[in-house]
Image (tube, helix red, strand yellow):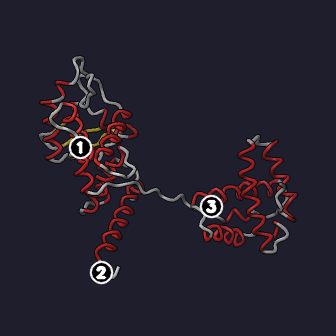
Amino acid sequence: MKPQVGPFEDELVDYLHYLTVERGLSINTKYSYQQDLVQFFQYLMAENYTSLANVDRFTIMAFLGQLEQKGKSRNTVIRMVSTLRKFFEFLQLNKMIQNNPMEQVDSPKKAQHIPAVLTLEEVETLLQVPDTNTPLGLRNRTILEVMYATGLRVSELVNLKLDNLHLDLGLIQTIGKGDKERIIPIGDVAAKWLTHYLNDARPLLGKQQDAHVIFLNDHGHQLTRQGIWKLIKQWVKQAGITKEVSPHTLRHSFATHILENGADLRIVQELLGHADISTTQIYTHISNKRLTEVYQRAHPRA
């Protein structure tokens, strides 16, 4: 069925032809552009516009505001802005309009995804899952303790070498993103589990061992990121935790919990190895969300 776009039909047909012939876009992509533009044109018709030459930035902003009022997602609005930007550039390039209203419209920022974070109780429950009476169970408990105590990325954890440990000083050395080296404190509890694992479990994991790697599988070879992922999924299920948990969740939990207990944001940035503090600031949103949840539960008039 042909979309009803009234006085804007010629511009729509010309633009769709351009997308097909000049840009060679797929049918699905072209259809997506068409859907966005039809929605925009129908808004213009409802507001009694008869020419795109009369559209200005205020028209655009009012249309985007209406999308948000209708409950459209942030990503939908961002896509619409992108569609309109390309469309009006086409019109200006082909001298179909004189002024481009999109030049004065900024693209909205993508909504920040706030990652899942475990509560202290959930962390404790998860730590209790591995059977530490077996070599693999002892290794598994140590992995959890180290991840939660240091905020290491999974890739950093699996690549830890024996000479990266300075347990007498309470420190771990690691190479993060961009080959940047950082030194991370490790608490007494995690350090004790690590020593226990190295002395009592690691020597029992396989005959042909990767000599310098800390965390080994049951064949004596280096654990992989995928191996850690599978293990954590298994442990989370055993712990009865229903949240969507990934290996990164322990890193998120580490950062959130130390912030909630008074750590400075710059310190957390250093511990996590973030190049830009704006990346670390996501954890302030988590902490504020947690603060609100506690307030709502605790205040008698909340």
Tag 2, which secondary structure?
A: loop
Evaluate if marks 2 and 3 touch, with contact meaning CB atoms under 8 Å apart: no
Q: Residues within 10 Å of mark 1 (few under 14, many from 20)?
A: some
Which label number is shown at residue 129?
1
Which residue position holds label 3? 77
Count every numbered label the image shows and give the total: 3
Which label number is shown at residue 300?
2
Image point 35% across, 33% down: which residue? 227
Image point 67% across, 65% down: which residue? 104
Mark toward the start of the polypeptide (2 vs 3):
3
Question: Disc 1 marks which amino acid?
Answer: Val
- Hey, which residue is sitting farthest top in the picture? 208
Which label number is shown at residue 298?
none
Image point 87% across, 65% down: which residue? 7
Question: Disc 2 marks which amino acid?
Answer: Pro
Question: Rounded to the nearest whole Å, what is the CA distance between mark 2 and mark 3?
Answer: 39 Å
